[in-house]
Amino acid sequence: MILACALSAASWARADSGAVGGADVLDLFRQGRVELDAGGGLGVFNSNEYLLLQLGGAYYLRDGLSAGLMGEAWLGSSPSIGDVSPQVRYVYLGSPWRFKPYVGAFYRRTFYDKLYPALNSSGARAGLVFPLNDRAYATGGLVFEHYFSCDTNVYSSCDQVYPEIGLAFSF
């Protein structure tokens, strides 16, 4: 199972104000905005523990709808693992709450430095976005991922469900 989490310091505004730091939180997800995503955490593959580092970005094609690319490096054990993942996400801006629900989909290509061939997967995610200020937000949710051409002699399962916690900065 993979657990990726990012640390953040939250500066919460009043829930009924609709604004954080003088700006509408919905502006975080408006068409034309660019975001930078960063994360890290711990992961396990074949009983080996790894430090995970993630970096990516996205562009809002329409209000609430983003398309982006995420890269991930698994460090500290063997084999070395890396992946690249194009993804889309929709944040439902019509929610009356300060936090906003999201859904998304992704494709992932995972590379190994030795022993294993590259592996393709795709999946879906859902959760909540928590605006921190007018330029940053945290996310929390669940991910379902399915691996294609998966060898069950190597992988314990070809399907995974795991939590995700993240931090993003919008420009």
Image (cartoon, grey):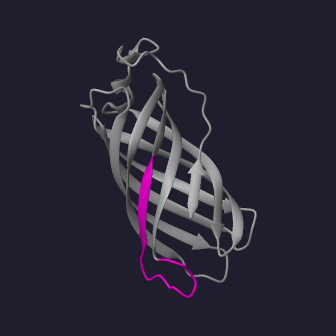
Pick whichever, 161 or 55, lies toward us.
161
Which image quarter is the N terminus in?
A: bottom right
Is 143 covered by the magenta stretch?
Answer: yes
Q: Is residue 171 left or right of residue 155?
A: left
**In this image, 54 relative to 24: left or right?**
right
* Residue drawn 38% across the image and 16% down it: 19
How many dots with numbers?
0
Tell me residue 34's x, y (percent): 43, 35
Residue 18: x and y, percent?
35, 18
Please identify the residue farthest to the top as the structure is shown. 22
Q: Is residue 29 above or below residue 150?
A: above
The outermost residue toward the right is: 76
- Image position of 41 with respect to 111: above or below: above
Residue at x 50%, y 75% (from the top left corner)? 119
Residue 42: quarter of image: bottom right
x and y percentages locating residue 56 in the rendered image:
52, 47
Q: Residue at x 52, y 43 (%)?
A: 166
- Please identify the quarter of the rendering in which residue 48 is found: bottom right
**Is residue 161 in the magenta section?**
no
Q: What's drawn in magenta, residue-wise? A: 141-157
Residue lying at 58% horizontally and 55% vertically, measured from the top left: 3
- Pick out the residue farthest to the bottom: 153
- The part of the image, by quadrant, that contains residue 90 is top left
Locate residue 110, reporting x and y percent.
53, 69
- Residue 152 vs 28, above or below: the answer is below
